[in-house]
Amino acid sequence: MIQRADELATIIRNASEIHIVTHIDADGITAGAIASVTLQRLEKKYSIECIKQLDKTCITKLLSENHELVWFTDIGSSISTQYPELKKIITDHHECPPDSDVSFHFNPHLFGRDGSYELSGAGATYLVSKAVNKNNKDLAGLAIIGAIGDLQDRRFCELRGINTQIVKDGKESGVLQTIKDIRYFGKETRSLAKLLQYASDPLIPGISGREDACVSFLQELQIELKYGDAWRTWVDLEKEEKRRIISAIIQILLSKGFGYQTATRILGKTYIFCKEKKGTELHEAKEFATLLNSTARYGQYEVGLQVCLGDRGKWLKEALNLLSGHRHNLVEGLQFAREEKIQKRTYLQFFHAGDGIRDTIIGIVTNMMLHTEDVDKELPLIGFALTENGDVKASARATQSLVDKGLDLAMALTRAAKEINGIGGGHNIAAGATIPKGKEEEFLQLLEREIQRQFDS
Ligand code: C5P
Ligand code: C5P
Ligand code: ZN
């Protein structure tokens, strides 16, 4: 991998004009930011764009623009062996076939590593950036935000694989610190009750999803919910108060018959950016990633990018505005999906949001849905939403245990989409596709066939 990173670094050094193409999620924005800083430091002429997916329209546009070099980050592996007329390098982590092992393609899957948890798109981009100049180690923090944004810590409750090296780099360059702490989202900025209300991994039976139950639970533990007028957050708590809450949750889980393994998932590594202010959206990786997801997924990638590049003024303010909209949309989206009802079939379950949920957040909502209390964890969940072009976006999510039994959603969605003139891809545990409207039923049948085959082989 080091050798491949060096090869890409040489191509970058030899180019004088480079166009970066990246993906619209947190991993994509941080990948794009790492590539941008790398090129700024080399004093190269560069430009950047953020896209939802790499379709024919994008490629046609790129070909017509005649760039000297295109740098695909967190996207691009799907076309690594196509369009030789497009001079390119790719730093990506999506599943790709072994025959895409070409000299300008950097992807952990080509080296027997799993891109769903060992390295993100931002991580792959970071490793090439470090090959360009080892002083770029200060960009490790951005690569960590990308990995956390892609939920790469989910499998082991901490980052593993090649990500471990990036964590080490971040610590050495003084930007990153890790602590063992509760894993729930919103430790820096959410009120305690909200932190527990939205807790999903592990779910707290009788408490997650119910605000009043969260408040009484905390009151019974004699935790003050407010300091004067301000709601207290997790980071405001004393060590002893944290311990009291964590043991009470573990006790609930064990008493309801959840095993030790599920109960201990409450604790894991938290990734903290020591140079940012405590109690803000920028201090902890999960919250930082969500802030970035609030930008590019709503067509405002410039906002997220500028925050990654260091702006703490007008762009950050704009990002925070977008964040409140994003949070609202997720709550509404979840509500909407619940009302739509999930339909179960033999090998999968699905819901169709129509135009009720934006295609750019249907993946996040599908993930949240799968991890709510009453949803079956034995079947992968597919969420459909209409796109602005009149196509249908499909997002698929599964559990690690289904993946361990042989499920590979990326493979299934890629194949099923291809048969009906769509495009798909992703990871074993999470994948997506865009298909023509009206083809949903056919797509589901093809998917079921693929999934059945995976479990049988
Ligand atoms: O496009 P990209 O690779 O950056 O996105 C990865 C996707 O996989 C994210 O939407 C993330 O939420 C999902 N994922 C997941 N569970 C995991 C790992 C990744 O849902 N354990
Ligand atoms: O869009 P969604 O979050 O559902 O995507 C899940 C994963 O599938 C992401 O890693 C995304 O990059 C990938 N994907 C893909 N090709 C598509 C749609 C999604 O590789 N057409
Ligand atoms: Zn990614």
Image: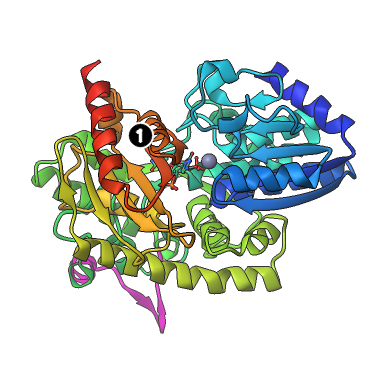
Q: Which residue is mark 1?
A: 416
Q: Residue at x 47, y 72 (%)?
A: 324
Say which quadrant the C terminus sits in: top left
Image check: 345 left or right of 184? Answer: left
Is 314 located above or below residue 340 in the figure? below
Could you tell me residue 1's position as x and y percent? 65, 19
Q: Residue at x 22, y 52 (%)?
A: 249
Residue most extreme to the bottom: 229
Q: Give the magenta-colored segment's residue range.
A: 214-233
Amino acid under label 1? Ala
Is 230 located above or below residue 398 in the figure? below
In-front residue for pair 95/390: 390
Is 118 one of the magenta-colored residues?
Answer: no
What kind of element bears circle 1? helix
Image check: 194 left or right of 150? Answer: left
Question: How many C-alpha atoms fall within 10 Å of the one at disc 1: few (<14), some, or many (≥20)?
Answer: many
Is 218 one of the magenta-colored residues?
Answer: yes
Q: Residue at x 59, y 26 (%)?
A: 107
Is 171 located above or below residue 98 in the figure? below
Could you tell me residue 295's position as x and y percent? 57, 63
Res 138 → quadrant: top right
Is residue 371 visible in this depiction of the protein? Answer: no
Could you tell me residue 232's position as x and y percent? 39, 71
